[in-house]
Image (tube, rainbow, N blue to C red):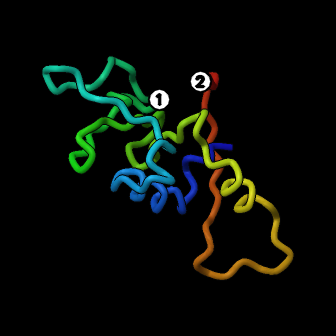
Amino acid sequence: MLDNSLEYVATWFAASRDGDAAKREWYVWADPQPDGTAPNNWLSVFGGPAWAYQPARRQHYHHKFLRQQPKLHRLQRPKRSMQQRLRPKQQQPEPKQPTYRLQRSEQPFR
């Protein structure tokens, strides 16, 4: 399961981008090269660069798939928050709760 594709991740990313101390390192961020280009030449699975520049933070964030799916940092991942959200609920979900989407990739995970 690609936890990066969950809808609630957008609020986490906004908090990380805006400098929230608790979520600042939840995503893979890197400084641009001296000439302002992406940190390296990594490509996303769907083509194009795997880095997108975020002017608010003056850094690039990594996305393995789509730009709208920033990659959660493997070592700083919010495990407790993730486990709480993925735990099955007893009652029916309310309309505004996060939805889950599975994606298949031919690429091996690193």
Secondary element at tag 1:
loop
Residue highlighted by disc 1: 45
Q: Residue visible at 64% across and 59% down?
A: 100
Q: Is residue 21 above or below residue 35?
A: below
Instruction: Give how far across and how far down residue 63 sits, in percent.
Output: 43, 37
Q: Residue visible at 79% across and 61% down?
A: 87
Q: Earlier in the sequence, mark 2 or mark 1?
A: 1
In this view of the protein, which residue sits in the foreground, 72 or 2?
Answer: 72
Q: Residue furthest top?
A: 41
In this view of the protein, which residue sits in the foreground, 102 or 30?
Answer: 30
Residue type marked 2: Gln
Residue highlighted by disc 2: 107
Q: Is residue 57 above or below residue 108?
A: below
Question: Which image quarter holds the C terminus?
Answer: top right
Instruction: Give how far across and how far down residue 30 sits, in percent.
Output: 35, 30
Q: Residue visible at 74% across and 61% down?
A: 84
Is 11 left or right of 103, judged from the image as shown?
left
Q: Residues within 10 Å of mark 1 (few under 14, many from 20)?
A: some
Q: Residue visible at 38% across and 43% down?
A: 67
| For the residues bearing labels 2 and 1, Cβ distance under 8 angstroms | yes
- Residue 75 sits in quarter: top right
Whole-number angstrom distance, CA of label 2 to CA of label 1: 8 Å
Q: Is residue 35 above or below residue 11?
A: above
Instruction: Give how far across and how far down residue 2 sits, in percent.
Output: 62, 43
Is 45 left or right of 109, judged from the image as shown?
left
Residue type marked 1: Val
Instruction: Give how far across and how far down residue 64 sits, in percent.
Output: 47, 33
Question: Which image quarter holds the N terminus?
Answer: top right
Q: Residues within 10 Å of mark 2 (few under 14, many from 20)?
A: few
In this view of the protein, which residue sits in the foreground, 52 or 55?
Answer: 55
